[in-house]
Each structure stands twice: as structure tokens, then as C-alpha cells.
Amino acid sequence: MLSNIKGQPDSEILFHWVHDQIERGGDAMTAIEAVIATVLGLKERKTTALNFTLCDGERVYALNLPLKRFDYYTLAWKGLPAGGVFVGSVPIDDALRWTHLRKGELPAACLCPKVESRFLC
């Protein structure tokens, strides 16, 4: 799967790496945890943050893992009235129901808004 990558952005590589782990029979949360642990274990990494979202059709996963500039790389989520969640780098309205992800937090929100979190570091 990783040999099918067309571009070179680190986000594309990360996505394909997680997708490859899921295709090998893992669930999304376990795949994300394994890939992030490997990235964090690299001795020569120039990564400033690992922030992303992923949807597997049933759940939305969002990771906020700044490694530098902790006030710059942020993610927040909000449950939607009709179900589901919205994830963004900043809240897009003035409502007070936004939840900011903490460093290393990987919540998985069901498309019906039940949220489970794990911390990766």
C-alpha cells in the first residue's frame, strides 16, 4: 500500500500508513496508536505536529499532538444537533460547546456523538 503513494506530503504518508495497518486487520484506533508510536520513536524526525482527522464510516478520529509550538497546533470538536461531530483547528462559532483536544488526545466520536478518548503520550 505505501508504494502506491503519489505525493510526498507527510500527511499523505501518515494517512496511507494508518490505512495500511487497518487493511491488515487492525481497528482504526489501534492502527493510529501503532503508527504514532513509530513516528515518535524515530530518532531523526523533523515533525512539528501530528494533527489529523480520519473517518472510517462509523467513527471520526481526531489527533492533536503538537511536538513544537504548542499554542499554534490545536484541534477542537463539537457535537452537532443532528448527530455527528465537527472537528476544526479553531472553533468556527461563538457557542461554548467546543471541546479542545489536549496534547496527545485521540478521541473517537461515533457519528452519533458518543466520545471515547485515549492519550498517546
Image (cartoon, rainbow, N blue to C red):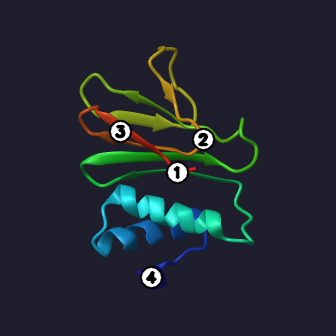
First of labels 4, 2 by sequence position: 4
Residues under labels 2 and 3: Cα distance?
15 Å
What residue does disc 3 label?
116
Q: Is residue 79 above or below residue 61?
A: above
Residue at position x 23%, y 34% from top?
Answer: 112
Callouts 1 and 3 close, C-beta under 8 Å: no
**Closer-to-camera residue (81/38):** 38
What residue does disc 1 label?
120
Q: Which x, y percent locates residue 119?
A: 50, 45
Give the amino acid type for the residue marked by disc 3 in the picture.
Glu
First of labels 2, 1 by sequence position: 2
Dividing the picture into quadrants, the one containing residue 56 is bottom left
- Residue occupying the far bottom of the picture: 3
Q: Secondary structure at mark 4?
A: helix
Give the amino acid type for the residue marked by disc 4 in the picture.
Asn
Q: Is residue 41 above or below residue 89?
A: below
Residues under labels 1 and 4: Cα distance?
28 Å
Q: Which x, y percent locates residue 99?
A: 48, 26
What residue does disc 4 label?
4
Residues under labels 1 and 3: Cα distance?
13 Å
First of labels 1, 4 by sequence position: 4
Which of the numbered marks, if any, corresponds to residue 103? 2
